[in-house]
Each structure stands twice: as structure tokens, then as C-alpha cells.
Amino acid sequence: MSETSSLTGPIVEAFTKMGIFAMRLNSGTAKRGRYYIKLCPPGTADVVAFMPGRVIWVETKEIRDLNRKGSTADAQSAFRATVESLGHLYVRATCLDDVLEVLRKESK
């Protein structure tokens, strides 16, 4: 279970209640029996949501992890640059209100 599962679930649920299709994404690999399954690439955001004409990627962070350095943080920065270059919205959220605030701004 992800260290931010307590945040990703409510974010997906909030999007769903607003009629926005959203899903939780997992990166890395998982073992199923004796087989390994490749999931999303390292750095992929935790949640993706699809609105008419807009894709929103949400990276959930515990406040204590905001200044983390290393290969995971580097991969997340690269992912963010890629999706923003495509015109998608990228949100780094430490709470549900971070996402709701962005949605309020987007709906204006």
C-alpha cells in the first residue's frame, strides 16, 4: 500500500462524485504468482483524471516528503515536464483541498 493511499482514494472519489473519470495509477513492478507485471513507469503521477478537453495528473505527497531528493523525485520532475509540455495539468497535492482549489480555478 502506498504511503499516500489515505490521500489518493479521497481524491479519486472526489473526482468521481463530480462526474470526472479518474483512476489511481501504480508504478514499478508487481509480482503475481511467479510472474512480474510491469506497471506504470517510475515518476508517473498517482492519479489521472479526464475532463472534457483537459487531463489532470495528481502527484500525492506527504508534507514530510515535499523536499525529497533522489531518482524518484527526478523521475517525477521529468514526468511533470512531459505532461505539461502536452498541455496537461499537473498538481502536487498534500491534501484534497489542493486538488479542489485547482479545479475551482479551472472551472472559471
Image (cartoon, grey):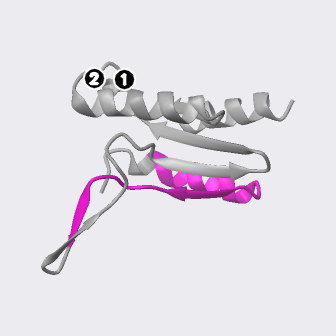
Residue 92 located left or right of residue 87: left
Q: What residue is disc 1 on?
A: 66
Residue at 68% over, 52% down: 50
Q: Position of residue 35 (x, y in %)?
A: 17, 76
Q: Are marks 1 and 2 in contact (CB under 8 Å)?
A: yes
Check disc 2 and give the amino acid type. Arg
What span is colored magenta in the figure? Answer: 7-31
Q: Quadrant of residue 65?
A: top left
Foreground residue among 35 and 97 = 35
Foreground residue among 103 and 54 = 54
- Looking at this view, name the residue that lies furthest to the bottom: 33
**Helix, strand or loop status at disc 1:** loop
User: In which quadrant of the rendered image does the N terminus lie?
Assistant: bottom left
How packed mark 1 is, by other alpha carbons closer than 10 Å (few <14, some 14-19, many 20 or more), is few
Q: Position of residue 90 (x, y in %)?
A: 57, 33
User: In which quadrant of the rendered image does the C terminus lie?
Assistant: top right
Whether residue 67 is visible to the viewer of this picture, yes or no, is yes
Rendered position, 98 above or below 69: below
Foreground residue among 22 and 81 = 81
Residue 4 located left or right of residue 29: right
